[in-house]
Image (cartoon, rainbow, N blue to C red):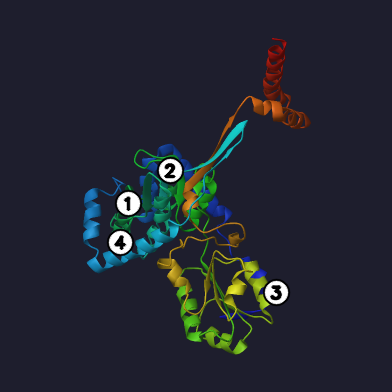
Amino acid sequence: MLQIRPVDVEKVLKERKLFSTSVENIVSKIISDVEKRRDGALRYWTKKFDGVDIDNFQISEQEITSSVSKISKSDRQLIKQAIKRITSYHKKQRIKQFVIKEKEIKISFRVKPVNRVGLYIPGGTAPLVSTVLMTGLPAKIAGVKEIIACSPPSCNGSIHPYIIAALDFIGVNKIFKVGGAQAIAAMAYGTETIPKVNVIAGPGNIYVNAAKKILAGIIGIDLLAGPSELVVLIDSSANPDFVIADLNAQEEHKQSMIFLISEDSAIARKISNNVKAGYWIKIDTMESAIDIVNTIAPEHLQIVCKNANAIAEKVIAGAIFIGSYTPCAIGDYIAGPSHTLPTGGSAIFDSGLNVFDFMRSYAVIEAQSQFFKKHGIIIERLAEIENLLNHKMSVEIRRKKLKKTSILEREK
């Protein structure tokens, strides 16, 4: 690891970019083509980027059955155990509905799941079973009626059986072998084969992220996930072998950003000498360490210090892991919370994927005529201040009718 000064952290962070303008230009072209030519465009871009001709994008029931049969009994059991843990955590996430009832008005706050969600599961060299679970289960628990998934085909025109099996285990309705920006565009606009969704969730490469950025607003997205990040904050109580293992584990993520922060130079150097990638920072006080962590606002933060819980209250991160026996790897797989977390410093305003990302809230308002008698003048004056005179009239006409009715009743 390269030692840097605390003042150099912001300079290093400038390297943390999601994508360039040139990437956005390429992706815009792909999106436009998919919107116009639909399945025809998907076939073209799949051939261009994945090197395979696809006639039917949807994975058949036979392919699903075949894929599940290829998974050993022990692996099926452990995947289902992970499903149970992740489900248990997300079932605790609830948005409380409520009703405010007064004489003149009733206001209800209501929550419902979106109708259809699209999952994006990256392909690459390894089957990302954990990504299936961490994106699909929060949607399932939210009560989404239909969940579809897209994943890039391999050179033989199929998806890894472990991905197909995991999607089947969590009850995904349809699986499609298509990847990249073209998959995101297909789920955003809909094609002859792939239905339009309301929300897209799941990580991907720079092209996938650029597509999500461009299409956000047309569809909902979970977040824009850049290269993975880990900050490990330690004191002399840390086990250096554990920390070395954790930092090297993080290095398995391509272009990962890794920081080690320590006030103990001896232990930091020992760790640094056994880790190839990343930076280590010598700090003089824990207060300055907290400032550095909050400047980075990392995806993952491990705190291996004597007063870790107190520090955790003062720092910003996508997820915080406390103590020697809480490596970030347990969060990647079975701790419970989704491992889809904010990167690129976005933890200062964004959150990890959860059940709420697949829900929409709205209000139902039902006013009685007496509401205008009591509050009409307030609304009318506010509308008048904003020079929205028809807004004023919309309320005034009702209030005056009430006043007139009241006068007539008194005359009788």
- Are discs 3 and 2 less than 8 Å apart at CB? no
Nearer the N terminus, badge 3 or badge 1? 3
Badge 4 density bin: few <14, some 14–19, many ≥20, Cα 10 Å: many
Nearer the N terminus, badge 4 or badge 2? 4
- Are discs 3 and 1 less than 8 Å apart at CB? no
Element under label 4? helix
Front residue of 73/276: it is 73
- Label annotation for residue 7: 3
Nearer the N terminus, badge 3 or badge 2? 3
| Residue 106 appears in view | yes
Report the mark closest to the observer, 1 or 4. Answer: 1
Position of the C terminus by quadrant: top right
Report the mark closest to the observer, 2 or 1. Answer: 1
Element under label 3? helix
Report the mark closest to the observer, 3 or 1. Answer: 1
- Label annotation for residue 197: 2
Which residue corresponds to the image point at 66% horizontal and 28% vertical from the top-left?
371
- Label annotation for residue 162: 4
Nearer the N terminus, badge 1 or badge 4? 4
The residue beneath circle 1 is: 171
Q: CA distance from mark 3 to mark 4?
A: 45 Å
Position of the N terminus by quadrant: bottom right
Percent across and percent down for residue 343 are: 55, 62
The answer to whether 331 is drawn above or below residue 201 in the figure is below
Compared across the picture, whether 46 is left or right of 280 comes to left
